[in-house]
Structures are given as C-alpha cells and as structure tokens.
Amino acid sequence: MSDYFPAEIIVEIFSRLPVKSLIRFRCVSKTWCSLISSHDFIKMHLNRSLSSTKNPPYLIFRHYDDKMEKEWFTLLSSNDPFPHNHFSKHLDCKWVFREHNRRVLEKQMEKKGFFAYPSDFKELHFPYRSFMKQNLYIVGSSNGLVCLLNDTPDDQTDLVALLWNPSIRKSIFLPCPGVKFHPSLHPMQYIGFGYDPITDDYKLVRLVYLYDLFDQYSDGKKYFPVPDFQIYTLRTGAWRTITGHSCQNIADQSFSVFLNGSVHWFGHTREHNGDFHNANSASHNVILSFDIGNEDFHEMAVPKSLEEVHRFNMKVAVLDGLLALVPYRDQAFGGFCSVWVMKEYGVAETWTKLFNINFGNVLGFTMNGEVLVTKSGKLRIYDPNSQRTLNPHIHAQPESFYFDTYMESLVLLNVEDGVEESLVPQFESLFYGH
Amino acid sequence: MSNTSENPNPSSSSAKMTLKTSDNELFEVEEAVAMKFCTVKQYFEDEKDSDVAARGSTTVIPLPNVHSAVLTMLISYGKKLPQSNAVADNHEEEETKKKERKKYEQGLLKNLMPGELLDLISAANYLDFKEGLEFFNQALADHIQNKSVEYVRKFFGIKNDYEPHEEEKYREEYAWAFEGIECWLIGELKQFMAKTKTLDIAGTLLGIKPALIVASFSVRGLNSLDSNILKPEMIAPGENILAAWINAIGPTGLDSNT
C-alpha cells in the first residue's frame, strides 16, 4: 500500500462508505478485508451512522401480499415511505386531472398495487420461510439487526430465534434457551430485543407467564409469572437465567418497543389477591420496561385516564423518539384510537394526548408525522394535520404488516453462527429455505 | 446593508506568515488561515518567546512534504471556512456564506482529478488540517463508493494478495455487492497505466524457417549509420492485416463497404 496513506486515513474513508461498497472492497486485498471485518471498525462505522443523521434513514416494512402470494421485506424512506406520486410516474396516464382518466388510474393502481412498481423501495432478500407458513414474528430491530422468531411446533415449547442483518445479507440462528416448564401449564412468552452501548452487545430478554389452562394450580389466578427470566447476549452466544428478580407485572401484549436503552411492553400490575379476568380496583395499567444494560425491570405509569384495566386495548409505539401509547377499540366496537406521547421520558405527568383517529388502528409513525393505520384490514396513511387519508394500494393480509425504523450496518459481519453444526439442519427445517 | 462594511477586511489586523513548500515556493498566508493547519499552529506554540507580529513577518515555516500546487488548494479552501477571529455574523450572513461555500466546494470537486485527492488528503493529514481532511475524505469516499475492486486497487496502488480461487469464491458468495457498479472508463484507465513502456531486446533469433521475407513493394529503407546499407531498423507485417473500423463509415469509403 502507498506509504503516504496510513491505515487511520483509509479507515476514516471506509467509515463514510455504504455497506455494499465495504463488502465489495473486502475483496481488494487481505489487509483491507481484515480492516473492514474488524470489530473496532464495525463499531466505528456504526457510531458514525448513529451520530450523523438525527433520524434513521429507512423504514423496514414487511407484509404478505395476497395477490402475488409472496412475503415481502422492503426498505422504504422513513420520511416519505409511500410517496404520493408513486403511481402517476409509472402508470401510463397523462391528463390525470380529467375525471375519466383519474378513474382509469385508480383502477390500475388498485389492480397493480404499490409494490408492482419498484422505484420507491428496495427489496430485501430474506432466505427463510416459517415452518407454519405463517409470518415470522418480528421482535424488533436495532442498529441494523432484525430479530425474528418462529413458533415452534406444538411438541416443543421452546424458542427458535434468528438475528438477521439485511444490509450484509447475513443471519444467525440462536440456540434454544432449553428451559422446561411444567407440562400442564401453558407458557406464554414475551420477548424483547435491544442494544447495550456500554458492553456493545445485543441482547434478547424472555419473560414467560404460565397459563393455568385447567385451573389446577393457581387458585383461580390463571396466570402466574415465572420467577425468573432468560437473557441471551450476542457476545456470549448463550442464554442465561436470572432468578430472584421476579417481575410482578404482567405484559398484556407481546408487542414491544426498544427505546432509550429499555424494552417496553404494555401491561398491568398484578395484585396478590387479584385475578386476571376480574378487574380489581387495586390493579391498574402500567408500562413494563426492562433495562437492557442493567438487566432489571421497572414500571412506568400510564396517563390517569387510561389506568383502568381492560377498558381499552393498548399498544406501545415510538413517535419521533418519544414513547407513545395508543389505546384503541377494535372495529367491532367502533374502531377508533388515540395517540398519546410521553414528552419527557420517565415523567408520568408529561403524558400528552396528541390526536384521535376515528377509524382503524395505528401501526406506526413516519418521520414527517404521518400515521400508518389499518382500516378494515387495509393499510392507510393518515395525516393528522390535514386529516386526509391516502390509500397506498398495498394488497396484504393485515396481520402481516410490520414496520420499524432501520439503518444499515455491518453488525454480524464478524460473528460466526453460534449454534452447533448439528442443530442447524433442525432449525432450517423450521425456517425452510428457498 | 450588512455589518461587514464596518470591518471590511478582518484579516488585515492579523499577522501573515510565510510557508515554504517542498518545491521551494513561498506562500504568504494570513494567520487566521494558517492556524487551521494544526501542524503550523504547533510550530508557533512551541516557540514561546516572540510575539505574533514579529514571528509572522520573519519566520519561514518549512513544509517539506507539501507541494505548492497542493498548498494553493488547501489555502484557498481554508479561506472559505468560517474564520475564528472574524466578527460574528448575523444569521443571514451566515447562510449566505454557507451557500457560497457549498458552491465553491462543488466547483472545486468538479475540476479536481481523482488522483489529486490523494495528494490533498495526505497533505491535509500532514498539516493536521481537520476541516480540509473532513471535506476531502468525504469527497474521496463519494468518488470510490460505486467503483469496482480493480479501479480501487489501481487508484491506491494496492497489490492483490488473494489467490484467484479465493477471490472467485468471494465474488460468488457476495455477488450482490458487485452488481450495479460503475464500469471503468477507458479515459480513467489511461490515467493509471504506465506512461512509458520499455521494449526488451530479444536478441538475435537464429534458425527460423522459413526466414521472413520483406514484401517486394516495401521500402527497405536506409540505415541510419551508413546510407549505403539498405536494411531497416524496425519492421512490421504489412500484408493481410485486420484492423478495426467504426460502423458508421466503411474501411474504404466505398458504398459497397458500408
């Protein structure tokens, strides 16, 4: 290598390159390959990406397309995921202001759908499919890594998880936690995924509640939380069980968000005399949070008007970097929801209601303030300022919608699959490849 | 209209210093700009006795690793940056200056040869010119981002130490990373090819049958040493040559040949 180009400058230049270029340039020479694959460089590249843009540049979007019978993973721009001119620039329809032609355009849009025209998104290559031919459950994503789960077949009540980095097209299977539960109690798992910057590590946390299906053990309480939980860390490549820090609160929804170093679920407090089905005045809604760094549980209060258990369904979300709570009523009960944000993290008094949406349920938020909602099973984009709704014409099963913010990174590049060779074929049959 | 009229030339109050390049050219630079080169700044901080004005006018700072052409560009880039001793501008002036700088940066990059970027970066690194390094590093990253592996090797003068089968395996495994990249243009290729080529003398070859015959219509040529000797210095085949021509015009110009 030229002697006036010290490695520090080369690495500086590398840190400014996109992931695809870096993967290609590993082929330039063995020195470059080891520079790019080194843990320090991966971290440097990640830090530069994290600090340079205030907001992540992409949204990762997953849906199962009915018409094309295909599961899609795509990257959309996080500012404008479904641009208004997406169709008119592709469909052969001049004079869009003429009524007749507008109808023709709409018919074509309806027929072909957003994902038939690839200019506004980047398709991601995902090599696995769920054993059950259902969508894989996506736990969350952090620093370019996406964590997915598969439901295991009934005879195995264990967890099969996958960490996937779409930008380098690499995935690794995680080993099973291997914890056994009482055979007549049905375990319900709640998983969270996040990043700990202090140890520079990615962790999964697993909470299990045992459901007493036949009322045999719990004195009518139905659920009891297991007094321990499991954590997986990427650096060790193994699960460990933490005992003695039982979480007394119960998560209601498996959906979790990772924000400010903690995983959050919506749940309620469990009073000792209380029973899951009968709302006890002592029991109230709460946000359950797990600090990924310190590995302990906390709770955060919800707005006073939303404390009553079972009055609404609720989910947690992230809006513009703030923790959001979305109480909603299903379509059957009128179908509306509202959006609350906690303006100052951790300070319950700062819960503020932003707006109502008189139809549908919120899926998530874009960077320019639009809301993705599902209305009667169809995806719509709602602008709370103008109160206008846009139909992006996406043909999909509503349960299959998932999206989250995403940024590219090199994480996982230097990690080898932590699972023993003998177990991989077993997993691959659960996630069978194309 | 604006505040700058009260202080038309903020740098007139500051001292100038002289920098000497590797090709012995002298550059008089305002202190505000020269101080952006931290190596230069360090040079002064090491000398604690004399005051700035005296130092600036007398001392010549040698920069043996920097060529004058490169220093010219670095100085003119340095001048466009916000000066640390300038009067604080209001928001409007700041925006105008930012726009000017962006325009200047775009113009600079347009006229720059990629190879010059390497010189600029290595000089900026030697001078510890942080803003310059930031800008030129980004420019270089943008330049190589979509280029092929071969281009990058030639550009940085890197030898490929992979075995052919290793490289092929890598390219196959990560084929997606090699798609959609820029093809190397012939013009750019020429930049990096050697400017001179040497012909090795093969020596006298004996025993070749049949011996090559010069065509009857060819000139034998006069020998440069003695015009009485009819023997060419160099000779090349002239019959049955296949040459290339463009599609638009046939080789002979006849209609039958297009």
Image (cartoon, coloured by chain):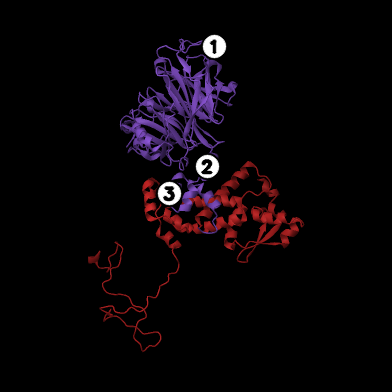
Chain colours: A purple, B red
Q: Nearer the viewer, residue B89 or A145?
A: A145
- Badge 3: chain ID: A
Say whether marks 3 and 1 touch (CB < 8 Å). no
Secondary structure at numbered mark 3: helix
Residues beneath discs 2 and 3 located on the same chain: yes
Q: At 70% from the left edge and 48% from the top edge, which residue is drawn?
A: B6
Give the mark nearest the N terminus, 2 or 3: 3
Q: Distance from label 3 to label 1 (Cα)? A: 60 Å
The Cα atoms of the two marked residues, 2 and 3, are separated by: 19 Å
Label 2 close to label 1 by CB (< 8 Å): no
Q: Position of residue B252 (x, y in %)?
A: 27, 69
For disc 1, the chain is A
Q: Find residue A385 and report its horizontal and vertical position in percent.
A: 49, 27
Q: Is residue A339 above or below residue B72?
A: above
In the rendered image, which residue does mark 1 sit on? A282
Tag shown at residue A43: 2
Q: Residue at point 24% right, 66% down?
A: B257
Rendered-image quadrant of the N terminus of chain B: top right
**Residue A287 in sight:** yes
The residue wearing badge 3 is: A24
